[in-house]
Amino acid sequence: MSTKNPSTLRFLGATDTVTGSRYLVDFHGTRILVDCGLFQGYKRLRLRNRQPFPVSPASIDAVLLTHAHLDHTGYVPKLVKDGFRGPVYATHGTNELCKLLLPDSGHLQEEESRYADHRGSSIHTPALPLYTAADAVKSLNSFHPVAFDEPLDLGGGVEATFVPAGHILGAAQLQIRVGGNSLHFTGDLGRDDDPLMYPPRQLEAADVLVTESTYGNRTHPASSPEAELGEVVSRVAKRGGVILVAAFAVGRAETLMLQLARLRRKDAIPDIPVYLNSPMAIDASYMYQKHPDEHRLRPDEFKDMYGVAVMTRTADDSKLLNLRGGPMIIISASGMLTGGRILHHIEAYGNDPKNAIVLSGYQAAGTRGAALAAGSRELRVYGQDVKIRAEVVQLEGFSAHADSDAILRWMHSAARAPRMTYITHGEPDASEALRLRIKYELGWKARVPEYQETVSIATPE
């Protein structure tokens, strides 16, 4: 148990970066970790995953997860491996998706370690994964699903409630009562106009607000994402090219297939083959059918969405796609080119100017996707430099995050201003831009916390 200041919040991640979401709440001997994510992007950030956790994992009483993306959940297997023995609470949707995401994360780490050993590209011999698929499967025994809007007594005067956040299946905001104080964590806020998910629940009064700021310095384009995708597909298909779409396996792949189905129904794109080359994305897509109360899709739209693509599960079928050539569309993970089958497709097709690499969402600084979006035309893939001559397109309208205007509208719905708003989960320029908007447009107190900073909950600075 903790013997720290009786009521504190410590920022163990998602400060000065979008990734590594981790917030530690201490209250009179009860210690709760909100989110347990992986750092991604720059090497200096990824190295944090290898450092000892800032507090003993055994001292943490419970973990609460806002949603299933790895920058919010991907460190759970390591935490359990290193001694955490408490429950991991998440919504039913998040719980189900983590059964896919976490073992896949361990598998990819093992695969990358084997590649590094084979090619001699690691400074370590042998190259060791942060955790294995078996570690991830073991950690799932700690998961306990909870319903939205069902108060959860965590003991010691701490209570938590999960409320809908939009974004992806199961995504939640967290309302936490700590003694006489209330904390609100946004997790990742979804969009009001998301084609797949319902909008996030409006903000209720809270003493301390911790908000994401991924798009804190920008707004989404007014143009139609469907039309934006259709233009790319038509242009590249006309020249016989392969369209490689880098997509997050949970949420983005479903949205892309939905938009492709709508475009095909209107005859707005050529009738070329579409392949969903991600076993995890295939399984995740079917999970959306189990939770119709969380999304906008009708049964007929599900049928069209699944019918638009050939589902590619096996590694052999994935390799055959690299021999097929265009025109065709391949949707594959990962969304920021940090790993997965998309990298093999880029090795095969990235050097041909008639092809296109499509980035379908936010690209965290330091990732291969961010490098491509910034104009780089050479990627380091499994220890080898790959020349990129394919067209690179970043679809601006496909983000599942609320933009700065939407975050301000969401905050404006609160009955009163928080005593303090902490701005996290954004690159420094995005977090600072949102801080200024909150200060001058809402008149609220707002701060961008430092990595590993500790603040008082009862009297936030």
Image (cartoon, helix red, strand yellow):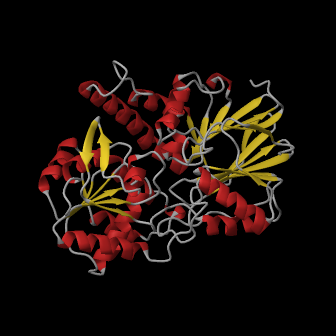
**Above or below 70: residue 412:** below
- Residue 138 at x, y = what percent? 47, 28
The residue at 22%/44% (across/down) is 314
Q: Give the percent coordinates (x, y) of residue 309.
A: 26, 62
Residue plotted at (53% across, 62% down): 294
Is residue 180 shown above or below 53?
below
Residue at the limit of the structure toward the top, as seen here: 125
**Nearer the observer, 229 or 434:** 434
Across and down, in percent, residue 1 comes to 74, 23
Residue 282 visible from this viewpoint: yes
In the image: residue 224, left or right of residue 217? left
Residue 98 x %, y %: 47, 42
Along the viewing direction, whichever of 98 and 128 lies nearer the viewer: 128
The residue drawn where x is 51% and y is 51% is 93
356 relative position to 34: left or right:
left
In the rendered view, tell whether residue 303 sits above or below residue 93: below
